[in-house]
Image: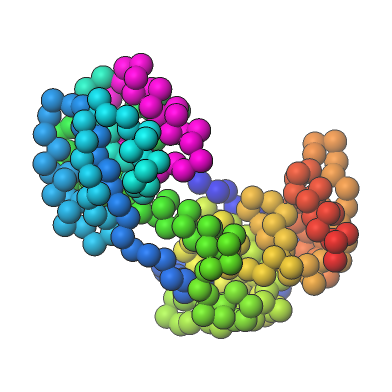
Amino acid sequence: MINALPALDKKGASETRSPVAAEVFNLTVEAKHWCLIVDEGTSSLEKLRMFVENSEEFDLLQEIRSEIDVPAVVRRERPDVLVINVDVLHGSIKELLSSLRDDTYAPAIVLVSACGDFAAEAFALGVSDYLLRPLSLERLEACFKRVYEQLSLRRLSAQFQNGTAKTDGAFKDELLLRTSGRIVFAHPSEIKYISAERNYVRFHLRSESILIRGAISRVALSLNRKLFLRIHRSAIVNIRFIKEMRPWSESGTGRVVLRDGTTLRTGRTYMTEMLKTVELR
C-alpha cells in the first residue's frame, strides 16, 4: 500500500469528495491469459480447472505432471499463469520457483497446497498467490482477480516501453477523470502535481483537486514523461510548475517548491534522476 505524501504547504484548492472507481484513460489490453497447470498433488483440481475454463479472462493452455521439464515447457509455451499443485514444498519445487523467477520470461505463479506452513517461503520465492485446499469459489475469484491485475499492468507497461499502447490520444492530450457523478477532462497543462493517498490518487489542478480511486503507478504510465517527473513513490510533478529544487538534508530528503508555494518532499534517488532529466531538457 502506498501511503499519502502530504504537501508541507498547500494553497487554495477545492476538493471533490466521495470518490468512486475511476479511469484515467482508456487502453487496449488483451483480456485472455493462458494458464498452465503443473499437478503434483494428490487432491483433485477440478474446481480450479472448471473456474479457469469458464473464465472470461483466463483459458487453460495445458495440464502436465511435475516430472516433466517444467521450465522448458514454460519457455516453449509462454503461459501467462503457472498453477503448481503440491502437497509439500520440497527441494525440486523450490528449484523450479527459483529458476522461473530468474528466467527472462516469468509467468505469474499460483501455488496450491493443503498446508499453509509453506506460504511465507513461497511468497519469498516470488509466487503471486498461495491457495489452500480445499478450494473455495470466493478464494479462486480473489486470487485470479489479483493475478489478472498484475498481468494487465505488466502487459500495459510492456506496451508503453515498445510504443504499442493505444491511448486514444490521452497520452498527449486530455486525461479523462471519472469521479463522483461527473467526468472531468483535464489537460496536462492544468495539472500541477499528483499525489497518492492510500487506494486513491489526487490530481491537483490549477482550480481544484480531484480524488479518484486508483494507483499512482498506473497513472504514471499515462503521462508524458517529458512533462511530468516522478519525485517520490507517492508524488508526480508537472515540471512547468516547479519553481526550485532544494538539496536534500542529512536525512536524505529534498524539497521541490512549486510556483504557488506548495512544497513537496523528494528522496535522494528521485532527486538525482530529476536533475539528470532536467539537464537533458
Q: Residue at x 48, y 82 (%)?
A: 183
Q: Residue at x 72, y 54 (%)?
A: 231
Q: Is residue 212 visible?
A: yes
Taking the magenta stretch, the answer to whether it contains residue 96 is yes
Give the residues drawn in magenta, as a range. Answer: 89-118
Location of residue 269 (image quadrant):
top right
The quadrant of the rendering that contains the C terminus is: bottom right
Q: Is residue 143 left or right of residue 155?
A: left
Q: Is residue 231 above or below residue 104?
A: below
Q: Position of residue 38 (x, y in %)?
A: 25, 34
The residue closer to the viewer here, 274 or 71, is 71
The residue closer to the viewer here, 61 or 266, is 61
Location of residue 257 (image quadrant):
bottom right
Taking the magenta stretch, the answer to whether it contains residue 95 is yes
Q: Is residue 56 left or right of residue 176?
A: left
Q: Is residue 122 above or below residue 219?
A: above
Q: Residue furthest top?
A: 91
Q: How is the image coloured?
A: rainbow
Q: Is residue 33 above or below residue 174?
A: above
Q: Position of residue 90 (x, y in %)?
A: 32, 17
The residue closer to the viewer here, 226 or 119, is 226
Q: Position of residue 153 (x, y in %)?
A: 47, 56
Q: Is residue 18 visible?
A: no
Q: Is residue 252 left or right of residue 56?
A: right
Q: Position of residue 71 (x, y in %)?
A: 38, 33
